[in-house]
Amino acid sequence: MEMQYSPKQIVQQLDKYIIGQDDAKKAVAIALRNRYRRSQLPQEVREEITPKNIIMKGPTGVGKTEIARRLARLVKAPFVKVEATKYTEVGYVGKDVEGMIRDLAECAYRLVKAEKEEEVRAKALAAAEKRILKPLLEVRRADKGNKSMEEFEAELLDGLRKGYYDTTTIEIEVMDAPKEMELSPGSATIAIGNIFGDMFPKKTKRRKLTVKEAMQIVLAEEADKLVDEDAVKEEALRRAENDGIVFIDEIDKIAGKGNRGGVDVSREGVQRDILPIVEGSTVVTKYGPMKTDFILFIAAGAFHVAAVEDLIPELQGRFPVSVELKSLTKEDFVRILTETENSLTFQYSKLLSVDNIELKFDQGAIERIAEVSVEMNATSEDIGARRLHTVMEYLLEEISFNASGDYPTVTVNIDRNYVDEHLAKLTGDRNLKKYVL
């Protein structure tokens, strides 16, 4: 596992995207660094050290999922987010918990495949250009004139690389990729052609495509030929087993004592099924058997009704690190709107710049937006930072509707008065359910 970040540096990276929640950031930073520390130890010691799984408690929209997602992206680790509520006990209709491990294997495979394809991109591109050039030559033969074939091919190749022929339609032979399907609920999605492996030769078919479309398909095919598929599968399994992160959301929804009147297949039954996965077992995936002993599991839930103590004791014991995330304050909302990379104010400014609208938010407007968001979270459901989507969408609804790009650039200054005027109905308890994500 490659790692160039200390725990403090990991927290600094997370601070770019998530405001506050220092306890949670510290916990995940330590967990991530411990994986690197473990990877540097001798094999016999490494086998004894398992990840310390984390459980996050906190209302929706305060950054639980985002912390885990950014963490995985930081170190290019295989990452999947699943909802505990979508699983049922094994033997009942619905997805079984082993599906999350298969999803992780799939994620790791795509990650490794993309890396390997990038390594052979130069060779694949040369082979793809050679394949595209042949049908392009037929289509553009009238342009040859008195040039020699070598000169004409060189000219076409130069034009191909510069994108001159992107919209030209050619007929080319490409692989007939089998369609994917899920054989049973909760099972891995597989391509029908893969069931029999290499027993039958792969089919090809002629297709009419633009040069740009053909280049994408042919480049993928040529890269696929150059990549060792078995090596990719082995590396994907290794990376998923040692670097994988599974984020189990809505864990509080399967807590509680269940239905005492009968079997509750979506609560305690699911907890019992999750237990061996988190504890360490082997799950069969389409890339081979995969051990779950060293996967980092991060569980999260609001825990408004249920408490962590309502989970079965064995499962609680598998999540030794517990952190609580706090509700967002006005200061947090101000920082979210101004300090985070790709903040909402930045996103809306870029969106509307397409239609020649230049948005400028002053500090008074930012503070008033934050105040309204806090008030709405306090008086209705607390949906955390997602409330900003509601407020910003309503604030800019009129501008977004009227902007068309037909006029020269117009600057719109958004100050406190503008916010008060356009959010008057919102602050007057207007029903805005349609804007809530």
Image (cartoon, grey):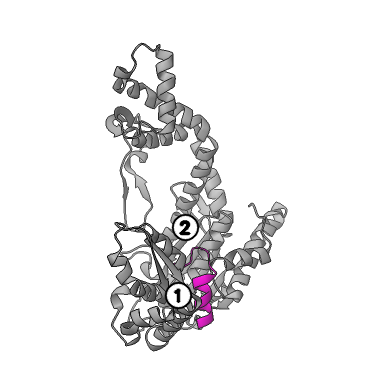
Inspect the image, locate mark 1, and give the three-letter code of the amino acid beneath it. Ala
Tell me whether the residue at label 2 lies in contact with that at label 1, contact meaning CB atoms closer than 8 angstroms: no
Compare residues 87 and 343 and report the one nearer the observer. 343
Which residue lies at the image location 38% right of the left edge and 27% below the top edge?
132
Dominant SS type (magenta)? helix
Span shown in magenta: 329-344
Q: Is 302 situated left or right of 424 in this image? A: right
In the picture, residue 20 is in which quadrant? Answer: bottom right
Q: Name the quadrant containing residue 202.
A: top left
Percent position of residue 216, x then y: 39, 37
Q: Please check the rendered image and state whether residue 341 is part of the magenta-colored stretch, yes or no.
A: yes
Q: Residue 273: say if magenta.
A: no
For the point 35% across and 41% down, the residue is 195
> Between residues 159 and 43, which one lies in front from this camera angle?
159
Determine crowd level at label 1: few under 14, some 14-19, many 20+ residues with C-alpha closer than 10 A: many
How much space separates mark 2 and mark 1, taking CA atoms?
A: 30 Å
* Residue 1 drawn above or below residue 196: below
Whether 55 is drawn above or below 158: the answer is below
* Percent position of residue 40, x then y: 71, 54
Q: Earlier in the sequence, mark 2 or mark 1?
A: 2
Judged from the image, the secondary structure of the residue bearing numbered disc 1 is helix
Image x and y of residue 89, in percent:
38, 68
The residue wearing badge 1 is 385
Q: Position of residue 342 (x, y in %)?
A: 49, 63
Residue picked out by circle 2:
101
